[in-house]
Amino acid sequence: MMKRFPLYPMLAALLGATFFILPLVATFYFSLKMTRGELGFAAYQSVFNSAAFLKTISYSTVASLVAILIGAIIVVPTAYWVRLKLPKLRPVVEFISLLPLILPPVVLVFGYIRLFGSNSWMPLTTSTLGTDVLLVMGYVVLSMPYMFRAVDNGMAAIDISTLSEAAQSLGASRVRTIVSVIFPNVRAAIISGAFLTFSISLGEFVLASLLNRPAFGPYLVQLGQDRAYEPAALAIMSFGFTWCCMALMQVFATRKPGQRWLPFPNSRPATRT
Amino acid sequence: MSFLSISNAVKSFGSNTVVKGFDLGVDKGEFVSFLGPSGCGKTTVLRMIAGFEGPTSGKISIDGRDVTELSPNMRRIGMVFQAYALFPNMNVFGNIAFGLKVAGLSKTEIESRVNEMLGLIGLTHLAERYPYEMSGGQQQRVALARALAPKPQVLLLDEPLSALDAKIRVSLREEIRAIQRKLDITTVFVTHDQEEAMSISDRIVVMNGGRADQIGTPSEIYNRPATRFVAGFVGTLNVLKARANGQDLQSVSAGGTTMRLAQPVRTADAEGKLSLGLRPEAISLTPSESRDVSFRGEVKAVNFMGSVIRIRMDAGGEIISFDMFNTPNQTPPTIGQLASAHCSSSDIFELSQ
């Protein structure tokens, strides 16, 4: 029997692709038209030559990396302990980790300003460092749903209970077990969470703007108000960056221990004997 | 004094008591198996020895030292798990070296010990392999080497062969026993497979409902089961309803015949009722001088099982199973035929409830 051509699914896929790709192509095309009468990368050049761009992207990169580090330090032991010793609390912890998706960042930042404002017991907003700390903590909170979900899924994939017992029977303390056994085995999950955190916090606007920090998000918005072609170039670069992150997540998630990063001809095959 | 001693250990999870007053002494270098059905508490006792579960009450000591309150990483035990539990991020060398690194040994000492262990399990050529690149049998060998590398005081094996196929299971159990004998390490082995326990243990603890029903050598457990549960769980058994004959405590009636037991009955109730056990291999169709008890009845089933033929016979209302060798010069009885089966009274034992 001849197979029927899947007309409707193909049409739906085409429509979806058009909806996604067309604006992207249009934006890319527009970003190339900065110099009158010719297509070129002048907008991209202009972005990279801007001192403000380099300053804000560096600031946001550092803040995001610190947020990833703190997030991992908080989330990994919490997810480990909850899975191992307090499984009944898992729905509660999961709910708490999802709260940032329910509460808008503006609520969080106003809460910070009230709690840590100049009249509070801990006036963090009165100093640059204090405000930076608040921004990073805000990023940690915003990335919590993604970080916790990624790490928790990573732990579900391995038998952390038996692995922990095996490590303990060999004399390892709880800390050593987490550092030497659990952490490396959920590394792919942590990295996935880290990339998600990075892509969220790099372009984050609300927290950075209301805390008045020189971050990339507010810079993007400002540029959108002042210029025409550079924001289009930045949008395309952001897309490229996010896709790179997703590709790297895929690489880390599927790579097995001992496997080479690239399929060299002499690489050891990952086969059972 | 025993090297490993468990005194009156009790373990409860909420209102559910899974281990009820467990006592055991294991000598240095001894291989003891915990045998029992699922949920009998054998793994819980093993986990209490390892320190993964704390006893609700009771005491556990190793080499004279009370370890009841000691955390697992301080007990100097080696454990092999059913699911191998090799660290996926480490290769074979890394897995075996883990305990040695934790113990703070030098690089040279670690290398030497790991190579020694790899030689012991015969996997020197796989030192660079990762767990996902090995078969189940190889992984379990590595798990054994990893547990033995830091020279533990006690080796604990939690159903280590259950996840393997039948052929590997037999070869690996022999290997485990050989290594255990070579290293003279005190070993506790948990299994629900009676054949496995019988073949490699010095002593077997048959567990039932959180208690040790019987502790003895494989031969004692098989030939002289202490309880009806042990008799039924270990091997195949004919259980005969019997009645004591008056004041003569050695004379009983069962399976339509009267016999004199080797020992006086101990467990008959007020009406003189008791249960007797008889292994199928103790019964034969051929009479002899030593076979002083004979059952007569109708053959109900004849099952061809390869080297043996199992026959089921109705003798005075009791179904008796017995085996005969499948030899060309001996024809098995046919279904419906009247036959006589013979055994020695010394093969019949009394079953306590």
Image: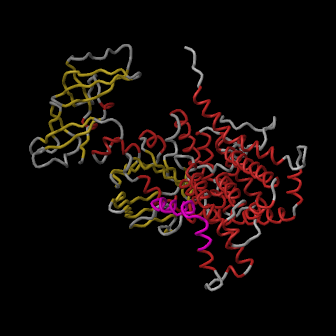
Q: Position of residue A13 (x, y in %)?
A: 63, 34
Q: Position of residue A166 (x, y in %)?
A: 57, 55
| Image-quadrant location for residue B58 | bottom left
| Image-quadrant location for residue B198 | top left
Task: Work out which residue is located at the far front of the displayed protein and give it.
Answer: A37
Pick whichever, B171 or A45, lies toward us: A45
Q: Would residue A50 appear left or right of A268 to someone viewing this image?
A: right
Residue B115 visible in rendering: no
Residue B56 visible in rendering: yes
Q: Eyeballing the image, is B330 above or below B23?
A: above
Residue A90 included in the magenta stretch of the image: yes
Pick whichever, B45 or A244, lies toward us: A244
The segment highlighted magenta reads: A85-110
Residue A82 included in the magenta stretch of the image: no
Q: Eyeballing the image, is B87 above or below A100?
A: above
Q: Which residue is pictured at 15% across the width and 33% down the height?
A: B258
Q: Which residue is pictured at 62% across the width and 29% down the height?
A: A10
Pick whichever, B39 or B255, lies toward us: B39
How many marks the image carries: the answer is 0
Q: Position of residue A144 (x, y in %)?
A: 60, 61
Q: Would residue A39 appear left or right of B346 to someone viewing this image?
A: right
